[in-house]
Amino acid sequence: MNNHSFRQQQYLFRLKRDRILIHAFRLLLLAFFLFFWETASRKQWIDSFIFSSPSLVLETFVKMLKEQSLTLHIRITLSETLISFFLVMSLGILSAVILWLFPKISRILEPYLVVLNSLPKSALAPLLIVWLGASEKTIIVSGISVAIFGCILNLYTGFTEISQEKLKLIRTLGGGRIDELFKIVLPSSVPTILSNMKVNIGLCLVGVIIGEFIGARQGLGYLIIYGSQTFKLTWVLMSIVILMIIAMLLYGILNLIERKVRKH
Amino acid sequence: MKPLLEVRDVSLSYHSLSGETPALSNISFDLMPGEFLAIAGPSGCGKSTLLNLISGLLTPEKGSIYMGDQPVGTPNTRIGYMLQKDHLLEWRSIYRNIILGLEIRHQLTPAKKELADQMLATYGLDKFRNARPSQLSGGMRQRAALIRTLLLKPELLLLDEPFSALDYQTRLNVSDDIGKILKKENKPAILVTHDIGEAISMADRVVILSKRPAVVKKIVPIELGLKDRTPMSSRNASLFKYYFNLIWKELNQNE
C-alpha cells in the first residue's frame, strides 16, 4: 500500500485535506450560530423571552429529562412516526404492485392519485380528528396521508420504467406476469424503494407533527403547540431542535442501510 | 425426413393509431432436425417478429406454425430464445442466473441442479459459479445466457442477433464459441442477423427476406465443402466470398 507514487500521495492528501476542511467549516458554522444566539440573548439584543437562548434550551432539556416527561414525548412521536413509516412503505409497495399488475386500474386511478398527491395534506388533519377522534390512531393516519400517495406514484413509475427486454426474457423462459414481478420488477426496484424510504421517513415525521398539533395530549408536536400557547417559547425551540436531531438520525440510519444493500 | 418446424404462409401486421403496418407477408419455410438456419434481411424488415411468432409471444394473423404435428403453443415451451443482450440479472450469481428458467418452470430438481453444475464445468464457467455477471467478459456472459437456455432442453433454439451487442473481435470469437457448443449439443437453431458473414459462417441454409413487408426472396443452401466446419473455419473457406456476393446482391436487388 505504501508504494504510491508521489503524485498519487499528493492527490490522496488533497482529498483528505478537503474533507477535513469541509467538516471543520460545518462545525464552525454551527458554533458561530450558537455563540451569536447566546450572546445576542445575554446582551439583550434580542428578547430572550421570545427568542430564548442555547443555554435556556439546554437547561430546560436537562430539567425535563429529569422529570422524565420529555422521554415520553419523544418516545410517542418517534413510535408514531415509525409505525406510519412502516405502514406507508408496506401499503405503498402493495398498491404499486397492484397498479403494475392491472394497468387498466392504474390508468383509471392515475388522475385521482395525482390530485391527492398534490393536495396539501395538512388540510386533511382537522377532518381526520373529527372523523377518527383525537387518538394515536388519528396521528398515525395523518403521518400516512402525507407520504402515501407520492410513495405509490414514485414506486409505480419506477416499476413501469423497467426494461421491456428483461420482461421479455422471463416470457421466453416460459414465465408469466407473476414471474416478471418477483424475478425482475421487485428485485430491480430495490434501489428505488430504498431512496423512497429516505424521502418518506421525513414526510411521515411532518404528518405526525401536523396530527399532534391538532389532536394530541402527548408528543413533540403537542409540546410545541402547548409551549406556544402558554408562551414557553424555550419549550418550542427545544422541541424543534429535538425534531431536527430525530430527522437527522432516522435519515442517517436509512442512508446506512441503503449503502449496505447497494454494496451487496 | 419430416421437418422439425414448418412455417406456412404466415402474415402479420402491426396496428397503431396512425394505421396498419404489414410486417410479414406469406412467409413459408421449413427447418429440418439438426439444421442451422439463418434469416438475413435489412434492418427493421420483421426478422425479430418472425422469432416472436415461432416462440409463441405473438400469434400470426394468417397462416400457421407447426412443430412436429402440433401447432406452437403460447408461449412455446419447446424452444429456447436468446435475445440481443444476455440480460443476466446483476443481483443474482451466475449459478442463480442460469437456473432462472428452471426456477420459473418449477423444474429445479436435484438432477437438473447437477446438470447445471456440469454445464458450467463443461463450458469453463465453474470458477465463476458464485460471481456476479459484471465480473464476466462479454463472451462469458453470452455463454452463461446460452447455458440458461440449454438447461431447459429446448428442441429448437432461436437466436435474435445474440452477438450484435459485442465488439467485432469478441463477436467473431463468441459466434465461433456458440456455434461449436450448438454443434456439440446437436441443437437445431434459427439465427436472425443482418450480418451476411455471420449468417454464412454459421448456417446450413440462409433464408433471405425482403424489405418490409417481408417476403421470402430466396433460400440459399450453404455448402462450403468443409469437414467439421466451425464458424471460424467457414470464414476462411474459398466459397465464403462467393456466397457473400450472392446474398449481398440478393439483398440489394431492389435498391
Image (cartoon, rainbow, N blue to C red):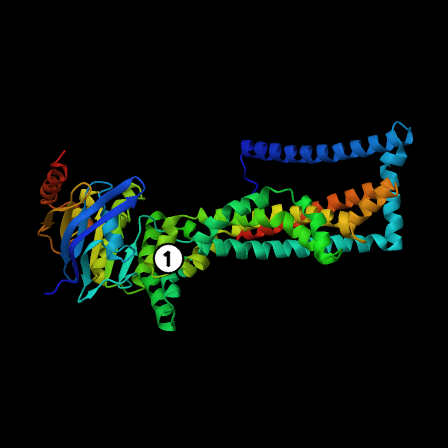
Name the chain under label 1.
A
For residue B138, side relative to residue A183 (left or right): left
Q: Residue furthest right?
A: A43
The x, y position of residue A123, in whole percent, is: 68, 44
Q: Residue furthest bottom?
A: B110
Q: Dot 1: within a 10 Å radius of its alpha carbon, few (fewer than 14), some, or many (20 or more) residues? A: many
The x, y position of residue B49, in whole percent, is: 25, 49
Is residue A249 at all visible to an observer of this figure?
no
The quarter of the displayed image where residue A248 is located: top right
The x, y position of residue A186, in whole percent, is: 48, 55
The quarter of the displayed image where residue A76 is located: bottom right
Q: Residue at x 63, y 36 (%)?
A: A16
Which residue was labeled with disc 1? A170
For residue B203, side relative to residue A160 (left or right): left
Q: Residue at x 71, y 32 (%)?
A: A25
Tag 1: residue type? Answer: Ile
Label 1 SS: helix
Query: Looking at this view, is A209 or B46 the one in front?
Result: A209
